[in-house]
Image (cartoon, grey):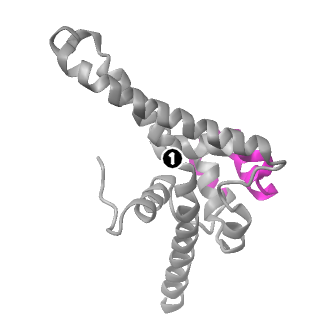
Amino acid sequence: MGFRVVLFAVMGLGAMYMMHLLAQDWTRIRPIQGITNLAGQASNALNLQNLAGQIPQLAGQIPNLASQASAALNLQRGKRGTLQRKQHAVPGIDWKRILARDPFECLQSLICQLMSGAEAQSSEAELLMDFLESSLEMAPAKIGRAFSRGLALRGNSERCYDEYPFCLYSAKTMLRILRWFSETKSPPMDEE
């Protein structure tokens, strides 16, 4: 009995360490979300139902939104120009480093679960799936296998637990841990 508890604790700590490594690289791909939020602010500012009563307010906000949009566009152009100058773009996530330190295959389980449809409403999951789709050719074979396995198990994310039996965490839990490591120093709270 005591051996099982120790083994369970070691597996949990190993998975937490893998999530910590992924969170370090996660902050590199999250700036895309800032541009999405800016677009949402612009669409809220241009809400036609409230336009008549807010014309004076909007007149003051338009230059600010325009300058923010211009700055975001220049940032993206700069990134695009830098990538075009380089022969091979450096991936935003160091997959090999994470895989080398993930003996319980929690990263592969997370990818399999996300691609099979788990946590489809989560913005973090959507961001990670989009990043995976755009950088899959640069990822190691284990990542590609987890990606394709998840697509094959579409709608059956529970079957990913059979593929990766040593990782005990669900995609929801791993995304909460990832958010916790990347954004705050306090434990994650339920958002239900």
Would you say residue 66 is visible in this rendering?
yes
Q: Which residue is at a point 21% across and 13% down the rendered structure image?
A: 55
Vertical relation: 6 (above or below) 92: below
Q: Which residue is at a point 54% across and 90% down the rendered structure image?
A: 3
Image-quadrant location for residue 95? bottom right
Which residue reaches farthest left? 53
Q: Is residue 95 left or right of residue 182?
A: right
x and y, in percent, of residue 4 in the image: 53, 84
Which residue reaches farthest right? 87
Q: Main secondary structure of the magenta part?
A: helix
Classed neighbour count for the residue bearing mark 1: other residues with Cα under 10 Å, few (<14), some (14–19), many (≥20): few
Q: Which residue is at a point 55% across and 71% down the rendered structure image?
A: 15
Q: 131 and 188: which one is in front?
A: 131
Q: 15 and 42: which one is in front?
A: 42
Image-quadrant location for residue 151? top right
Q: 188 and 94: which one is in front?
A: 94
The number of callouts visible is: 1
Q: Secondary structure at mark 1?
A: helix
x and y, in percent, of residue 22 in the image: 58, 63
Q: Is residue 7 left or right of residue 55?
A: right
x and y, in percent, of residue 110 in the image: 59, 55
Q: Which residues are magenta?
A: 135-162
Asked if residue 27 is among those painted magenta in the image, a careful observer would answer: no
Q: Which residue is at a point 50% across and 57% down the rendered structure image?
A: 170
What residue is disc 1 on?
31
Q: Mark 1: which amino acid?
A: Pro
Would you say residue 159 is visible in this rendering?
no
Q: 144 and 128: which one is in front?
A: 128
x and y, in percent, of residue 98 in the image: 66, 67
Asked if residue 138 is among those painted magenta in the image, a careful observer would answer: yes
